[in-house]
Amino acid sequence: MSDTPTIHDIAKYAGVSLATVSRVLREPEKVAPVRRSKVREAIAHFNYVPNAMAQQLRQPRFRTILVIIPDISNLFFAEALKNIENVAHQLGCRILIGETQRKQERLDHYVELLTSRVADGLILFGSLLPGVLRDSVEAGLPLPFPLVLAEGSVHAANCPRVKIDNVQSGEMAVRHLIASGRKRIAMISGPRPYTVSMERLEGYRRALDGAGLEQRGDWVVEGNFSMESGYEAMAQLLTCPERPDGIFCASDEMAIGAQAAIREKGLRMPDDIALIGFDDMRFAAYASPPLTTIRQPAAQMGEAAVRMMQAIFRGETIEQPTIILDHELVIRESA
Amino acid sequence: MSDTPTIHDIAKYAGVSLATVSRVLREPEKVAPVRRSKVREAIAHFNYVPNAMAQQLRQPRFRTILVIIPDISNLFFAEALKNIENVAHQLGCRILIGETQRKQERLDHYVELLTSRVADGLILFGSLLPGVLRDSVEAGLPLPFPLVLAEGSVHAANCPRVKIDNVQSGEMAVRHLIASGRKRIAMISGPRPYTVSMERLEGYRRALDGAGLEQRGDWVVEGNFSMESGYEAMAQLLTCPERPDGIFCASDEMAIGAQAAIREKGLRMPDDIALIGFDDMRFAAYASPPLTTIRQPAAQMGEAAVRMMQAIFRGETIEQPTIILDHELVIRESA
DNA sequence: TTGAAAGCGCTAACAT
DNA sequence: ATGTTAGCGCTTTCAA
């Protein structure tokens, strides 16, 4: 924790000018070998590393991407994040992570990192929109900083985004339930204000309409994507006069909560109740019974988002401003 | 994405000097109301936000903490991280997160953020030690930057750290198994090189010794903390000529994998095999059967680490350089 | 090939 | 109460 050496120290020690030290650092071939090694020696001696702030100030390079997610302990985001880190690493840029806990205030706080130029671009997961962006995004106005929307929940005019087709995948899930002969199909949906929730619910409705199956108000109960809420929603569903024989959960977490409620009642899956989740997170295969689910490609989503951001940084025109990734039905044993 | 205004633009627009603008920003009461509002108007007009790099360069405040964890999709770390974010927020400092995936190379890459002063301090989870620190930490030499060790796995002389007592908690887990009458107790341990793994294993040994119970080489199998490895380790344990009737898993993830293997064999928990995990992560309560486990206070650990870092920043002398947090036995249904 | 000097955007003495 | 000025640590013309 001793005092940090600056370029001056190096210059003095090596008996050269600041400019020479700087050159050794970034275009060493332009410095005579003798001095070059003198400088290198000094650098080694002081254990010198240039101050990144100062470098950045003088010669701004795009480099830091802020990634905002609603909840860091949600495995879907964790998985996406992981790949974002990986790809960003390769591409030589830095990742900053912010967790909003779905609070507007925290989101806005993080977004200050962009306006104050600590970060150069934003990859935004979740359904909240930063206050500063509210007007511009909706109206399709130019944005104050590079932005990529991920998981596709915010309604934004022409902003680059990467998502899956939530209504189609919701429909696919419910169709699978229908194909196995279920007639009384319920849904544990995501929280109401979020578009992902609404889209998956829409998929559920379409599948039911398509098959001419009954739809009842008390067969749709709203959770908040957590296991706890899944458990409670399922408990409630189990009290319905017409007990459902198939359940579509808008997230695997909720499905795992629901499974616990079903097991507690001594009911069997899929015999008594078939259950399908959404995400295919790491735990799905180890659930009891192993969870049938719709796979959302978290890793790919992360990668695509970073690549889009890079393209924006480079000033390339984005040929495909919204990328829709493939979802996939993963059949295990719960349905 | 238009050109960013600087303090000059504001000054010119408001017809005042740079200094006045700067003052309005940080000590507004020292500026006459008329000009103050003129400046504020200009700020609003340009939508001006000071460049954080430049601020930081001029007036360095300790503010950014780098948190390095092995695996972001491991819920234990996710949980700790969450609280770190929260506390740091309150304390007005920024968090950068780095994931090493247990690779020395990635760790060292992240540590450059410290030497180049993008970050001001490091909270290090996991058992890897950055290359730059190897000598100094072991020898107890002064460190090149503020460091707090969390989860207590690295052997470091007198570096501030926060951990739990892994051997005692391992012992507690196994004692619980013994108390329920188990005689043939196996362990699915963490990976060998890590001290946390070794300490929990030591706890297992002590408990067995204390009770005079048999210890067999094939009753200890090594996993890597993942569900997959837990599943495989359990499958292996199930082939032992003397089948264990109690299992201590060094992580809940491995325990959940092990549960799947046990269920597949049609064995019942805890009747045929009692199982105890470690961590008490979010999924433990929803496992089948709900997992008995040792609770590791992830959130507290995060909070304590941040507070220690703050103390170092402030130059306070740390009265208690190593904080040992309490673990706790959480009895559910698997043992 | 090298060095002097002018900034990058901001803050804080020091004057006034 | 306000403005002038000298940096923070670095990069990059521009001369030499």
Image (tube, coloured by chain):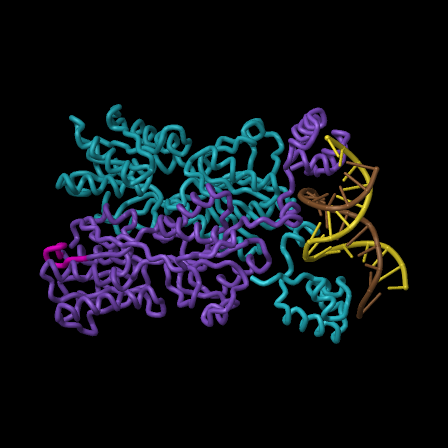
Chain colours: A purple, B cyan, C yellow, D brown
Q: Is residue B84 above or below residue B219?
A: below
State the image coordinates of residue B218 (x, y, percent, origin top left). 24, 25
Q: Quadrant of the N terminus of chain B?
A: bottom right
Q: Residue at x 27, y 61 (%)?
A: A250
Q: Is residue B297 visible?
A: no
The answer to which of A177 and B312 lies nearer the viewer is A177
State the image coordinates of residue B147 (x, y, percent, origin top left). 56, 39
State the image coordinates of residue A245 (x, y, percent, origin top left). 13, 62
Q: What number of labels is visible?
A: 0
Q: Is residue A269 magenta?
A: yes
The answer to which of A262 and A24 lies nearer the viewer is A24
Q: Is residue B36 left or right of residue B230?
A: right
Q: Residue at x 15, y 60 (%)?
A: A177
The answer to which of A44 and A312 lies nearer the viewer is A312
Dominant SS in magenta:
loop
The part of the image, by quadrant, that contains residue A275 is bottom left
Q: Which residues are magenta?
A: A267-275
Q: Is residue A82 above or below residue B154?
A: below
The answer to which of A31 and A115 lies nearer the viewer is A31
Q: Residue at x 13, y 56 (%)?
A: A266
Q: Is residue B285 above or below residue A38?
A: below
State the image coordinates of residue A299 (x, y, percent, origin top left). 36, 48
Q: Is residue B119 visible?
A: yes
Q: Is residue B192 magenta?
A: no
The part of the image, by quadrant, that contains residue B227 is top left
Q: Residue furthest bottom?
A: B34
Q: Quadrant of the C terminus of chain B?
A: top left
